[in-house]
Image (tube, rainbow, N blue to C red):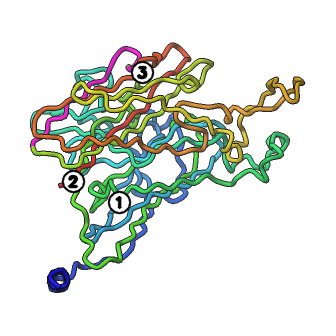
Amino acid sequence: MKIKFLLLISVLIVSCKAEIPSIGNYSVSVFQEENLYFDMAFKSDTLQLDDDILRLDAGRVLLKKVKLPKYELQPNVTVNVKLTSNGDPWDKSGSLFVIPASADLSLLDFENNTLTREQFSDAFPGIKTVQFDDRTYKPSVELLRFMTPFGVGHFNDNERVATLKPVYIPKWEDAVQWEQNITHLLPLLEDEVYIGVFIDTWTKQGYNISVQLDFEESTIPNHVKKKQEVISVLNTSKYAGAQRFYDAFSKGNLSIDLPVSETLKNAKLYYITTGHGGHKGGDEFTEKENIIKFNSKVIKQFVPWREDCASFRRFNPTSGVWTETTTWKGEEIEERIASSDYSRSNWCPGSDVLPEIIDLGNVEKGNHTFEFSIPGAQAIDGDKINYWMVSAYIVYDK
């Protein structure tokens, strides 16, 4: 009887609460079939305004200010990306990101010369939070890491490509699409924000890309939005002309200070990593251990590696193809293998990359330190372009 009475009281309390206003579902188109390409005409790295889209780093970065809904009820947020080649036949690294609205300085300041490489104390500017007098620079937060396939969509009708299609795929795909749930990044995706996309293309043809954010509001009555915050910790991706490909893991560990003014409840570190270096024995094709320490304690130690790259073959019409000798039923045979089939450092041509999620628990007030290391990483050496794209951010409860 007592339990029933308490339940009745709880129901009455909930029913007496003011109803939280609903704004419904939203779909926000950030980019629509936008051509991203490299052009020497942009080499000055000045901002190029085109239909409200800024073109940075010689055209290889698109940046757009978008208006996003602000919810009181809890929404589910997904990012959807669709990509086709516009004539670039290669596989290239890509990154979709948001500039934190709380940042006084950002990658935009690299482009308008508010910030210069010389103002940073290290050789790789813009990869971590830096204080400049009363203004704070914050690195961009990654929404989605992806890798373009070899020539998806554009080369499907090429006669040479037709002869290379394996018998086990029905057709070459017209596009590649990725979708990830990014609800945990909602604190950065409200009101007006800059959202950008980078692709490491070096051709004038480049790629066509569409990006959409979908907000699906909870239908549970009074399902109040979870109070969370996001801290940008690290991003070594090259988004600005003044930045460089990050090969410094070959020289030592990367330390990041984390000053905490109030306890971070239920904190989680999101860590995204991919290795690059397409030559024989490069970091792209060799297994390299990643180690993360927090306050000198190892919290994650693993080898980021993908062995399922052959499953993306249908997206890679212009991938190089060779023959390799293998044994079948006791006899040596020759079998065709595509470059896109080979295992890689946490990615495949045509894949997206999921973050590693590391539980930090409650992070108390005070000064803390992250240490990121990849002991086997190689340095850039001439045309051997080894580097690592590593980004990390913390999500915690308020």
Judged from the image, the secondary structure of the residue bearing numbered disc 3 is loop
Instruction: Check the image and report above or below for 182 versus 261.
Output: below
Q: In whole angstroms, how far apart are the C-alphas of marks 3 and 2?
A: 34 Å
Q: Label 1 sits on what residue type?
A: Val
**How many marks are shown on the rendered structure?**
3
Residue identified by numbered label 1: 66
Instruction: Check the image and report above or below for 265 versus 72.
Output: above
Q: In whole angstroms, how far apart are the C-alphas of marks 1 and 2?
A: 26 Å
Judged from the image, the secondary structure of the residue bearing numbered disc 1 is strand
Q: Is residue 130 left or right of residue 62?
A: left
Q: Label 3 sits on what residue type?
A: Asp
Instruction: Check the image and report above or below for 280 versus 111.
Output: above
The residue located at (75%, 49%) in the rendering is 156
Judged from the image, the secondary structure of the residue bearing numbered disc 2 is strand
The residue located at (71%, 47%) in the rendering is 314
Q: Position of residue 6 (x, y in %)?
A: 15, 81
Q: Give the magenta part as a residue range.
A: 249-261
Residue identified by numbered label 2: 397
- The foreground one among 189 and 291 is 291
